[in-house]
Image (tube, rainbow, N blue to C red):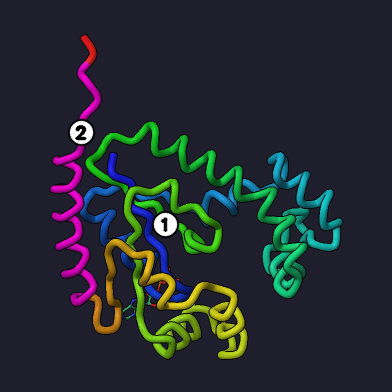
Amino acid sequence: MLRIGLTGGIGSGKSTVAGMFAAHGAPIIDADEIAHRLIRRNHPAYREIVGAFGAEILGADGEIDRQRLGERIFDCADERMRLEGIIHPRVRREIVDQVLVLESPYCIIVVPLLIEAGMQDLTDRILVVECSENQQIERVRARSGWSEDQIRRIMAAQVNLSERRRLADDLIINDADLAHVRAQVDRLDEHYRALSDAMPRPPATR
Ligand code: ADP
């Protein structure tokens, strides 16, 4: 199983690209979805987070209010590391478990903070999707209604474009229409299938 780590800044097009790989039949593992599920009420991570940050991060429904939690940790490195110490090891374990049961030439593991969280070792190749900063801002603004300031603050906390490029094995430039991005995904799908075919197989058991 060839494991492709798909990453990129906010609004760069990760979900769009993942959807196009899914259309080729590639299984998609989504680290954000895993993290959101792990912090739901009655999960061990929920209890640890509420223990660490107090009931003020809960919404009226008793679930963790991710926006409140995000604001609480955003400007405080200690608090952010504390939260990551609770969530990241569990996300890692679940990614490993999900990969183990897959049977396909390759899979796409979408990890927005792949580089920031040091999860590269869970992948065989890093695929970076990128567009210009202005496009990121425009796309996120249209999607969420957040202000440019808010979006820039999030972008500033993520690794920059050149660092991502330095670590990328493959790059998708998402600076034009969707047909342009789909053509790049089609080429990479073929490439990943060929790489997977060339990978050594475990000996067959009788
Ligand atoms: P990410 O998952 O990296 O945050 P998304 O894939 O959600 O990014 O893309 C951000 C927004 O921009 C979404 O609303 C998406 O539909 C839109 N989008 C992405 N790529 C394009 C494109 N090439 N042309 C137009 N809109 C796009």
Between tags 1 and 2, which lies in front? 2
Residue at figure coordinates x 79%, y 59% from the top left: 58
Which is nearer the N-term, disc 1 or disc 2?
A: 1
Q: Amino acid at mark 2?
A: Pro
* Above/below status of 182 relative to 50: below
Quarter-wise, where is residue 66 in the image? bottom right
Residue bearing the label numbered 2: 200
User: Measured from the top left, where is residue 133 in percent x and y?
Assistant: 43, 86
Instruction: Say which of 145 and 169 sits in front.
Output: 169
Does the magenta segment cover residue 152? Answer: no
Calculate the distance from the C-alpha at mark 1 to the C-alpha at mark 2.
25 Å
Q: Is mark 1 within 8 Å of ligand 1?
A: yes
Q: Amino acid at mark 1?
A: Val
User: Measured from the top left, where is residue 189 in percent x and y?
Assistant: 19, 56
Residue at figure coordinates x 56%, y 90% from the top left: 148
Q: Main secondary structure of the magenta part?
A: helix
Residue bearing the label numbered 1: 110
Residue at figure coordinates x 46%, y 38% from the top left: 96
Residue at figure coordinates x 69%, y 48% from the top left: 86
Quarter-wise, where is residue 176 in the image? bottom left
Q: Which residues are magenta?
A: 179-204
Instruction: Say which of 124 and 153 sits in front.
Output: 124
Hey, which residue is sitting farthest top in the picture? 206
Q: Quadrant of the N terminus?
A: top left
Q: Is residue 69 left or right of residue 99?
A: right
Q: Is mark 2 within 8 Å of ligand 1?
A: no
Q: Quadrant of the C terminus?
A: top left
Q: Is residue 167 left or right of residue 150?
A: left
* Above/below status of 187 relative to 152: above
Judged from the image, the quadrant occupied by ligand 1 is bottom left
